[in-house]
Image: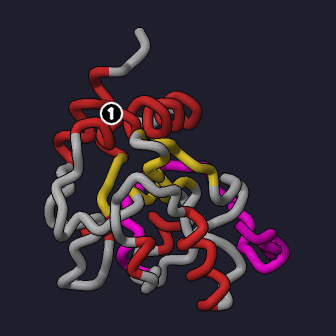
Amino acid sequence: MALIQLKPSLLTVRRQTVKWIIIHHTAEIYENPASKIDNNNYQMSYVYNSVLELKDADVNYHFVIDKIKGDYIPVVTRPFVYLCDWEDIDPNINNRAIHIAVLGDYDFKIPPARLYEILAYRVVNPLIRLFALNPSRIKLHRDVSSEEYLACPGEFFELDRLIAQVRRFVVK
């Protein structure tokens, strides 16, 4: 993978505490078909190539869940201090949100149980503890978007399954 120069000076700094976790899929903004297909290849390079083609400052998520050598791995793509820019999300929510993307297009494929487990255990639960959030603060992009027909993170992605996994891994 080529060295990619990211431009944090172009990113907006967060000024409020985190109150929401919003789940996306990468199919919504990255046109490169390789960033939409869930397979055994490391695919973040395709997402970064799309960022460069779009002339964006950085990946527009705080985390991306990639499939590497047959298992799902969370990749930090933007520090919490920077906001993600989503014009279709109310600023009162967007400016207080952490954005997580699952690599792939879940309008066409059912997310496997392992994806929900890794997303809950490795990313969502630590964020819930760090920011003292309730699982009711986890939202899907389609639920907070002003776009009427948006399906992100895909028709087959189920919030209830994710929340069940989040509750399963709660540290008591």
Residue at 60% in and 90% down: 54
Which image quarter: residue 12?
Answer: bottom right
Give me the residue at 73% from left, 74% from top.
11
The magenta-colored residue range is 1-29
Image quarter of the C terminus: top left
Q: Position of residue 144 (x, y in %)?
A: 31, 68
Is residue 7 in sight in this rendering?
yes
Kindly state the secondary structure of the residue where label 1 is placed: helix
Residue 141 horizontal/vertical position (percent)? 33, 66
Indicate whether 101 appears above or below 135.
below
The residue labelled by disc 1 is: 117
Q: Residue at x 18, y 61 (%)?
A: 109
Q: Is residue 95 left or right of residue 39?
A: right
Whether 98 is drawn above or below 112: the answer is below
Total labels: the figure holds 1
Q: Residues within 10 Å of mark 1 (few under 14, many from 20)?
A: many
Q: Nearer the viewer, residue 156 or 31?
A: 31
| Residue 10 colored in magenta in the image | yes
Residue 23 appears left or right of 3: left
- Outermost residue, bottom direction? 54
With 24 as the anchor, is 12 left or right in this view? Answer: right
